[in-house]
Amino acid sequence: MDGIHDMGGMDGFGPIPIEYDEPVFHGEWEGRVYAMNGAIGAWGKWNIDAGRYGIEQMDPAHYLQSNYYERWLYRTEQMMVVHGMITQEELESGTASDGERSQPLTMQQIVERQTRSRSARVDEDIAQKFKAGDKVLVRNIHPKGHTRVPRYVRGRTGVIDRDHGVFIFPDTHALFQGKKPQHIYSVRFDAQHLWGPDAPAQDKLYLDLWDDYLDPA
Amino acid sequence: MSEGHDHSHLSDTELRVRALESLLTEKGLVDPAALDAIVDTYENKVGPRNGAKVVARAWTDPKFKKWLLEDATAAIGSMGFVGNQGADMVVIENTADVHNVTVCTLCSCYPWSVLGLPPAWYKSFPYRARLVKEPRAVLEEFGLALGNNVEVRVWDSTAELRYLVLPARPAGTEGMSEDELVEIVSRNSMIGTEQIAAPAGDA
């Protein structure tokens, strides 16, 4: 979706908020959100792509007013309701409404499950459409669902830098429509091609893009 | 963001997080001890020191460096640094002519297994929005001014590959051991927003 999350190239956000010697978590609640997200994600009710899509569907104004872990909190709450782990009433009341109790995952079980689903690489022999050095045109697509091709490269031409192998395709995976495994390439773009003549002529951008985002140029 | 421990001053977000943890614990969906262990992992065990060890080894062992640049996942895995958000690694080398810097414009993808959790600025809207369009201006805010003799390469982590920058080894460190070098490798140098200065006292 052409959402607020697709920020590459936007102006107006001001300077980088550099902070020296910052803590890992700014406040205990951030750590609890991080940990709950991992512990709940390990139940396997959804995948990482669906989780990202969950954040992307936040109201844009809410997204911009929330920090990173506030967006994670929203995602964890919403995904748990959508996938039937808790009800909206329970979320609002903070109290379990029925007698049903699960057995929580231990740290060891969480780590084991995360290890199994850690890599998005798919061990299948699928032919690549491109090889290093090929010129490619990024498709001008605007899917309403989840996608990992940013707006700022759609319709632009680049060069295949390297082939990373076969991976899950997030656009279908996020919607629980299958892994659709295909090659990912590192695609190189000239900064001037993307941003115009004011960009330094020698500077480059590299994005990881899937076969389904690319056509020969 | 309130850092206070007086419960009467908890923010709405803090109250919401407490209520959620309480609910999930009551339903048997999370074990607070497992949450404690996850927090402890990223506060105390997994952090940029892992990446610094990879860099120091690459600086002192040419065979390891070659392996790292060709198959970062295997080379880093050989040092025991495997984990979430680091299953498929790519290492890119900074030289006198090329400066690499990493970002994730769409969310905030980051190589947790070698750098720990990302700093707030990496996840900030200005960094995500600006780095791809005006990397040199962003780097100047970090105190790094690059000349036109240097090619800047911005890597936008749009997929599940996770990027680690191999910073250039500074002059004046020839006599330092691998363990000593670990101490001078900064986190930001492995993201690409800094270069590592020569140690004080050396030319």
Image (cartoon, grey):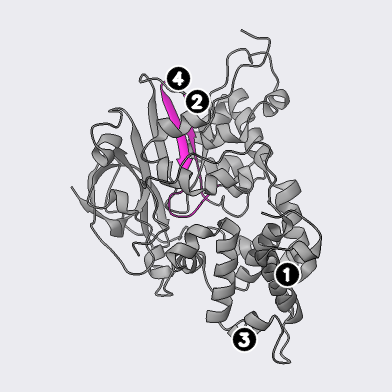
Which of marks 1 and 4 precedes in the sequence? 1
Q: Is residue A7 above or below residue B99?
A: below
What's the magenta region?
B88-110
Q: Is residue B103 magenta?
A: yes
**Pointer 2 and pointer 3: residues touching (CB < 8 Å)?**
no
**Residue closer to the observer: A98 or A164:** A98
- Residue at label 3? A89
The residue positioned 43% from the left and 63% from the top of the image is A60
Q: CA distance from mark 2 to mark 4?
A: 14 Å
SS at mark 4 in the image = loop
Q: Position of residue A7 (x, y in %)?
A: 40, 52
Task: Name the residue at 52% across, 48% down.
Answer: B124
* Residue indicated by mark 1: B18
| Chain hosting mark 2 | B
Other-residue count near label 1 (Cα within 10 Å), few / some / many at <14 / 14–19 / ≥20 = some
Mark found first going from the N terminus, 2 or 4? 4
For label 2, the residue is: B144
The kind of residue tagged 3 is: Glu
